[in-house]
Amino acid sequence: MKAHKKMWIIVGSLTIISILVYLFFWMVTSPYDLFPDDPIRAIRMREAILNILSRKGIQVLAMIVSAILISSTSLVFQTMTQNRILTPSLIGFDAIFITVQTAIVFLFTSSSIFYLNPYLNFLVATIMMLGVSLLMYRLILRNNRNNIVFLLLVGIILSTLSRSLASFLQTIMDPEEFQSLTIRTEVSISNMNTSIIWIAIPMMLIVLTALTKDLKTYDVMTLGEPQAIGLGVSYSKKMNLALVYIAIAMSVATAMIGPISFLGLIAVNAAREILKTYRHLPLLILSSLIGIIFLVLGQAIIIETGYLTTVTVLISMVGGAYMIYLVLKENRT
Amino acid sequence: MSKSLSLFRHRRAILIVLFGLLVCLSLFVGVLDVSVIDIIEGNPDTWNILWVSRIPRTLAIILTASSLSIAGLIMQAISRNKFISPSTAGTTNAAILGVLLGYLIMGDQSLIIRSIFAFIFALISTFIFMLMLRKIKFKNVIYVPLIGMMYGAMISSIATFIAHRYQALQFLNTIGIGGFSNKAVGSYELLYLVVPGMIVAWIYATRFSIVGMGEDFAKNLGVRYGFVISVGLMIIAIVSSITFVMVGTLPFVGLIVPNLVSYYYGDHVKKTVIDIALFGSVFVLLNDIISRLIVFPYEVSISFTMGVTGALIFLIIIFRRMKHEGT
């Protein structure tokens, strides 16, 4: 870690700058006089500013939590698949999420407590997503040991299946119910579901603690399955556990900021490129920071440029080009 | 040998009977009653319904399904990968991008111009994907289509970016949503353009599977590698762009049909082209009839039905394949 001291300082300060830009840059460009002399207006203005800041603060928090969850689990997922390009978002958690929400509205109507209470709704959605992914793990990994690439393929097909089912339910649903449903299903970075942030943070902490406890094991698992087993790692068990953490993390991130498929790919590969190490601890920290920078700074820039595009699209474009570069480079070495 | 050959014929006969039955069913199912007696008696109203709506619709289904299945077959033969099809290699996404750009450059235009734009982009994108495929070292059967889908996601994000920039998001969302419900006289004839593509595919069938074995191998057998690949890519691009513009996306057809057929008939590409066309038609006809009946007298989009049935069948295929390879 010491060899990269300068780099850590740069990345660390960039992260802080990103957050500050997101929180405060609007003040610079605001057409209003934010600190008027008139005392009554000053009080009102201060209230308005605090209001905006607290909203932005929660948004930043949601983005940070999601970025950390996505980056760190992508890192572990790459270790499990022995591959630098695949990310867990390919499993298609967003499709399962949409289907769960549609099914809730369809079965219990949009006025039910499962739909209206954000915490309960989130819990139901997360448990369902977790259930589906665990079922998939069991079905596939038991018969085909450690074949995660196969798992991904099944995941993609399942997501097409569940998306078709959701669309079907949505077509035959009452139009008003459908309207209220879109609020939940069209979650994206510019339309975050921040109401669940106070349950997302503890979940992130749980996942992170669990992951950090196993980081050394993951270092060994990088060597490959036979080598790791030879060195005394109970490979299948550790992998199944890691997949559970990944499923939890992806469920939380999807419910909060929607699907961002290429973020993990960019963050983890950039971190690998910079650090040139196989140790998971520094990689996890750096990729989380890079993830935060991409997400928060990207969103800040997009807001300031008047929503020229969305950060999801931006990340997909950058990430896609980067992926092609990685695929071609892999061949040369 | 002779036994397997007779079995082979037998299966094709079953397929043809099934096909005939479903065609009849497709002609008779609908809100307006069509009865056999009316047809024989020459009732003008009944004949009108058949002629204007039912026959075009059925023809559209047959053309789309068979050409898409053959395009999938070509793609799988060239890349030697059973999990590749226009929908898992970015071709469909590129067609969407093409239609969007055509709309932005030239405004709302005819279906022919839309198809041309879709064709050009589908061709370029498929070509790039094939180039990438040659560079990929780790040619795991499943890894390659995953890369293809990520590549498709990138193309889609470019389309979203452009659409967002020029306030065309709403238009973007309407591209590719279709189905066969609006197919009547005057709105399906462009689909005939896939017929030459299918004929060429039949002529070149053997050469596609030779090309799939690698450049050196193909050259040793006297097959012009680059030329045959280009012919294949052209057919894929024509078929996927025209069917896409005319009927929208039909998930899984190009993927499942060649897989199922090769499961029952083996990998002899030349022999199976016709079976694949038949099987594809049977599959899509069945799905179309289901979509027409499930909320009768209304219809659901065939994309939903295909998404469900196709996904289930595909899951069964890959589970079988994996079990086979795993043991």
Image (tube, coloured by chain):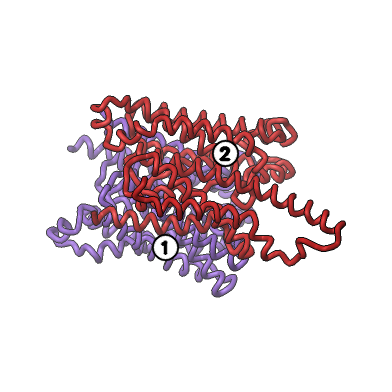
Chain colours: A red, B purple
Chain ID, mark 2:
A
- Characterize the local packing of mark 1: few (<14), some (14-19) or many (20 or more) Cα atoms within 10 angstroms: many
Q: Which residue is mark 1?
A: B122
Report the residue that reaches farthest toward the left. B220
Q: Are marks 1 and 2 in contact (CB under 8 Å)?
A: no
Q: Which residue is mark 2?
A: A97
Q: Could you tell me if residue B151 is visible in this image?
A: yes
Indicate the amino acid at tag 1.
Ala
* Residue A304 locus on image (x, y percent): 62, 63
* Residue B234 locus on image (x, y percent): 35, 64
Give SS at disc 1: helix
Q: In this orientation, which residue lies closer to the viewer: B73 or A141? A: A141
Q: Is residue B48 above or below residue B251?
A: below
Q: Is residue A329 above or below residue B291?
A: below
Q: Could you tell me if residue B12 is visible in this image?
A: no
Quarter of the view holding residue B78: bottom left
Q: Residue at x 58, y 38 (%)?
A: A99
In the displayed structure image, the side of residue B90 where residue A113 appears, left or right: right
Between the residue at mark 1 and the residue at mark 2, the CA separation in whole angstroms equals: 31 Å
Q: Residue at x 87, y 57 (%)?
A: A40
Q: Quadrant of the N terminus of chain B?
A: top left
Q: Residue at x 69, y 48 (%)?
A: A55
Chain ID, mark 1:
B
Quarter of the view holding residue B126: bottom left
* Residue A298 locus on image (x, y percent): 54, 57
Indicate the amino acid at tag 2.
Phe
Q: In this orientation, which residue lies closer to the viewer: B65 or B148? A: B148
* Residue B256 locus on image (x, y percent): 39, 43
